[in-house]
Image (cartoon, rainbow, N blue to C red):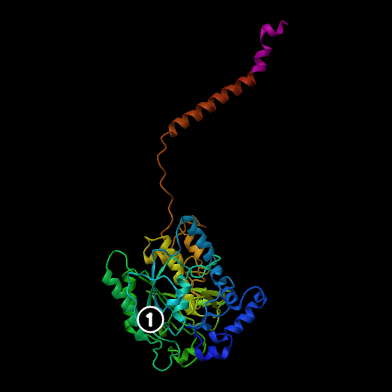
Amino acid sequence: MSRPAGPSARRRAGCRTAAAAACWGLALLAPAVGAVGPASALRAAPETRSCTEVAAEDPEVGPYAAPSRALEAMGVPAAHELLRRRGVVPGEGVTVAVVDSGIAARARLPESPGVAAYGPRSAPVDPHGTIVAGLVAAPPRPDGEAVGVAPGARLVDVRVLDAFAPQEGQAGPLSVRVAEGLEHVLDEVRRAGGSRPVVDIVNVSVAVPPEPRIDAAVEALWRAGVVVVAESGDRPVDEADPLPDELAAATPGQDAAARVHPAGAGDGRGEHVLAVSAVADAGSSTDAVLPSSAVDVAAPTTSGVSVGLNGGTCGVDQLSTSWAAAQVTGVVALLMSAYPDDTPEEVLDRLVPAADGRADVRSPTRGAGVVRADEALARGLGGADPGAPRSAGTAEPATAPTPEPDLLATVRDDAVWWGVLGGGALLLALVLRPVLARRDPARTSR
């Protein structure tokens, strides 16, 4: 998981806090100073900072300056256009629980009114959960550029930690806390009852050591009709990371599945979890992510866009399976809004085979490949090869359709034969006409 910079790191970086607003104004707005006052210009300026560098007290400046190349690489804009033509808002009717460090109120992200939140209600100190939530469901920018993959989805804040690098008195990422968050969502689903769960997807952009309670909760959520999406794990970089120290270095044949949960829940099998890895801009794998046999799919994360603690849009410039899991969660929500009657199995049968790799030969760092939202959405919408089986493991042999009875077949056959006979008689008459003409007395007497 990525490590957002703490307050001290932000102070050292310069030009990153509210106290450095004048520095930002000079850097971004020098051409406009003669036309408008500094305060007005600051509010109108485009945002250029990384989301991990934005503090809650920072002013909310203009929208982020660049489009999200990560979404473009996954075909999300094309998927949005397909849904727009159908009159569907991406993610509408879908509820996503975000098990993380909390969602900032200033982010103004859509909350689900029917499901109880979990954890402290104080303002988050770590931007991680807000960034994750924004990648899933933040609304578009004023110019229409997408931020969240599924802006129509509703969110449930399940706060299980304060910070990934906790200070004194703060809770860090612990397996038992992640288990408690998952159990809270399961309790809400069971309390509500009904034919469809009140939570459709759980995003866990947190990687922790194995915990039997996590395994049990993940399996119970899946059986209740809830899809759990989890990061497959970044390589540990400091002592604050909860993952084992032996995963800090890449080794031949390394497989982190059994040591990283919830992605590898169930003794490393991860059979009830959609485990997501991250790839670089060019789609290549990197040692920054942990190889794992539990990986199902991957997503690019650098050059993405989300929302910071101050409520403004900002950049996602880190390669991290945390961000990748959030983006894939958005794609799952998008598919659920397009196919509301699909079971979780059917949703994943659309998602995984549509990735750009091979679902039957999976990579430990890419799984079936980078997700393609447009391709997954088109399976069943008349896209390329719409009749292809959606699951390679359960596909049935193709059979020709039974022809319907042709009530006019006899009439047509008779008409064809009468045409053949008539044509033959006409041809015979044309051939014999010269012969008969030479034998006609009336013609020879002239």
Q: Mark 1 belongs to which amino acid?
A: Arg
Element type at marker 1? strand
Question: In the picture, residue 124 is in which quadrant?
Answer: bottom left
Residue 413 percent coordinates (x, y)? 47, 32
Identify whether 12 is placed above or below 58.
below
Q: Is residue 434 within the magenta segment?
A: yes
- Farthest-out residue, top: 445
Residue 5 percent coordinates (x, y)? 51, 87
Residue at 58% across / 88% down in the picture?
A: 14
Q: Is residue 412 within the magenta segment?
A: no
Nearest the eye: 443 or 283:
283
Nearest the eye: 446 or 243:
243
Residue 391 visible within the image: no
Q: Is residue 264 left or right of residue 147?
A: left
Residue at 43% across / 92% down in the picture?
A: 167
Q: How many marks?
A: 1
Identify whether 383 is placed above or below 49.
above
Please state, as top left, top right, bottom left or bottom right, where the C terminus lies in the image: top right
**Mark 1 crowd level (few <14, some 14–19, many ≥20, 10 Å Cα):** many
Residue 32 visible within the image: yes
Residue 420 percent coordinates (x, y)? 54, 28
- Give the magenta part as a residue range: 433-446
Identify whether 347 is placed above or below 291.
above
Residue 34 percent coordinates (x, y)? 67, 75
Q: Main secondary structure of the magenta part?
A: helix
Give the labeled residue for mark 1.
159
Q: Is residue 261 left or right of residue 23?
A: left
Nearest the eye: 46 or 198:
46
Residue at 65% across / 73% down in the picture?
A: 35
